Structure formats: structure tokens, C-alpha cells
Image (spheres, helix red, strand yellow):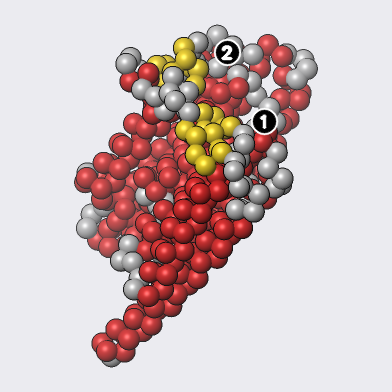
Amino acid sequence: MQQSAMLSALIKNRRRNFTVGLFLIVEALLIFLLLGDTSGKVSTFVLAITRAGTNIGAPDLVVPTWSSILALGTLVGVTALWQLIRGFQRTNAVVISMVAVGIAAFLIWATRDKSLNLTGMLVSSVIRATPIALAALSGLYSERSGVVNIGIEGMMLMGAFVSVVAASVAGNLYVGFAAGILAGVVLALLHAVLSIRYSVNQIVSGTSIIILSLGLTSYIFRAFIDPPHPELNSPGSPLAAVAIPFLWRIPVVGPILFNQSPIIYILFMLLIATQIFFYSTKWGLRIRSVGENPKAADTLGINVSRLRYISVLISGGIAGLGGAYMSIGSVGFFNEGMSAGKGFLGLAAMIFGNWNPGGAFLGSLVFGFFDSWQEKLSILQVGVPTELLGMAPYIATMIVLAGFIGRSRMPAADGTPYEKQ
């Protein structure tokens, strides 16, 4: 029996090595195809950027297009051959690194005899990734406790709407943020009662919250705000970026990490706090145990329902914050359906990151990056439909879900109601 299991694992490992190696060979061939019209051309990446009226200087990164693409394609090709012959111990890291190399090769090709502000693109990526990362964190708290929360999309939309109205009435953005968080918590409480107290199918409960939020915000917006009372949709200018002294002047890194909206700093702190909470505290361990085996946790004296309620309410609060960021923290007004699928993208990023804070944030950055590069590459007119380029993060998510670069494992009791025996 043991020998059979070992043989099965060996065959599976070799099959995976072959599949990954084949994928990398295809990637290398695609990179080499970019060499066609690049002879004698150069690619320029601008690293300087102007923030808060101050130019943060840095020399441009200028590379020869043809030789750079050739070198990157060769690197991927050599990696593919090594994977086929010997295999890497850390296959996941290798695949992610080679995909990054492929993206770099494409950007070099796209900027042949042109220039691209790389720092600006990365700054935009972080900004665009923020609501997705908040949605991913929201889903993480709920699903780690065993409650599926696809209603995050609706909680974000309601948070965006309520925060705008509250900020407009109070004349204070921070009142708006508090109201947006509260709106998310209220909807999360509804989801928790339905799914935990009454054991309603959690997908159905989450879907009903999305429909409720879409219908309610659209009706109130049309009936009472646009056009009757436009002043209720005028919260003032969005939150300005806050520069951290000295650090924000560091070329490239400074504008990306140290000259951003206060909500982005809060996101960074939430990521660190969540990592510590789940993996270094007793409460975090209890929540994870409830999501993995609620019956065993119950026998140890852990109140399963209470922990799930708390987790879902935290999830709703973070989703409400994400919605408030989209409205009063970013654009300064509310539009119907302005969440635009960010809640679903957050859940995809959470799955991409295997239900871990760091991985979820990385997945969010992937979505934010491709959202930003769609805009930048449309300006460069590279000849490739931007809609096609925008499919890349979704394809990456499907690859992860298929187990191509490692099996993504959800909490064992996720989505399963628990009734105390």
C-alpha cells in the first residue's frame, strides 16, 4: 500500500514537471516571436514621477529591445529544459518568476522606440489593487471561519453609497468612512443571521445581498439624489495622498509605497495585522479551527457560532471600507453599480493567494497591474486588443484553481453550516 502511494506520488510529480516544462517552452516561443520587428530599436522606461507638485527624479531605464527580448526568452527556455530534465523543488516560485519575465519581455516589446512611465504604472497598480485587496481580506476573514461570503460585492456597493451620503450631509469624509463601514457590517449581520442562525444556503444568502444592494442603491439614487438632491452626492474632494517624510522621496519605491492615500496605509497595516492575528494568536487559531473542523472545535469548548458571527461582521466592515474608498476615497462621488465586480475580483484574489493575507494581496496586485497596463498599452497602441490583455489575470486565476502551480485548498468546512449536537 505504501509503495503504491509513493509510486502514484512520483508519477504525479513527473507529470506536473512535464506540464510546467511544456508551459514554459510555449512561453519561450511566444517571447521569441516578439523579436520580429525589434532590430535596432530601444525601449525606454521612465522612472521619474511628479507627486504633490514635486518631481522625484530618477534616470530613465533604456534597454536595447532585440537583445533584451532574446535574453529573456533564452532564460525562460533554459528554465523550461531544466524543469523537463531535472525539475525544480520550488516549482511555484519558478513559474511565477518566469511569468513575470514574460510580462517584462512583452513590455519591452510594447515600448520599442517609445517610452513608458514605469513608476507611474506601478503607482496606479497599487491604487487600483486597493479595493480588490480589501475585498480579498474581507473574504479571508469570513471564509477562514467557514462562511462563504459572495455578498462582498453588495456590501462594497452599499458602503460606497452610504459613505457618500453621510459625508455629504456631515461635511466630513471620516464620518463617511465610518458610515460606509457600518453599512457593510449591517449587511454582514444579515448574511450571518441567514447563513449561521437559519442555515440558509450561503451562496443564496450572499446573492440576495448583492441584489438587495443593487436595487436599493439604484432606487434611492434615482429617486432622491440624481437629480432631486445632487448635494447629497457631493462629499468634497477625495482623500489626498499623505507623504511619509523622507521616505516618499526615494526614487521609484517612495512614490509607490510612501506617498499614497491613508486608506492604502490602512490596507498595509490590515495585511500585517491579519497575518499576525491568524498565525500568531489564540483567537486566530480558533477561527481557523472553526473553518476546518467545527465539530472538533466545539468539543474543545469553542463557541463556533459566536466566532463565525464575529468573523463575518469583520468581513462586512472591511468590505464597507473598500466601498467607501471607491467613492469618497478615490473619485469623490457615487455612481450606480460602481463596485463593478471588485468584490468578485477580491474573492478571486483570495483564492489565487490560497486563503492567506500575503497571497491574497499578491493576487490583488496582479489584477491591479493588468488593469493599469490595459490603460497604458492602449495609449502606446501596441496593436493587441486591450480586452485580450485584460483577460490575463482571470486566466492566471483559472490556472491556479486547476492546480497547475500547486493545489489551492479552501478551508475544509467552508460553506458548510454547523448545528451543535
Q: Is residue 368 above or below residue 181?
A: below
Could you give the CA–CA distance between mark 2 and mark 1, rounded to whole angstroms?
22 Å
Dot 1 lies on which element?
helix
**Label 1: few (<14), some or many (≥20) within 10 Å?**
many
The residue lying toward the viewer, choosing from 146 and 81, is: 81
Residue at 64 percent across and 20 percent down: it is 333
The residue lying toward the viewer, choosing from 171 and 270, is: 270
Tag 2: amino acid:
Ser
**Label 2: few (<14), some or many (≥20) within 10 Å?**
few
Residue 101 appears in the rendering: yes
Dot 2 lies on which element?
loop
Q: Earlier in the sequence, mark 2 or mark 1?
A: 1
In this figure, which residue is indicated by the disc labeled 2?
A: 237
Residue at 34 percent across and 73 percent down: it is 86
Residue 311 appears at what percent x and percent y?
A: 38, 43
Residue at 29 percent across and 56 percent down: it is 289
Residue 218 appears at what percent x and percent y?
A: 71, 31
Q: Is residue 39 left or right of residue 147?
A: right
The residue lying toward the viewer, choosing from 265 and 165, is: 265
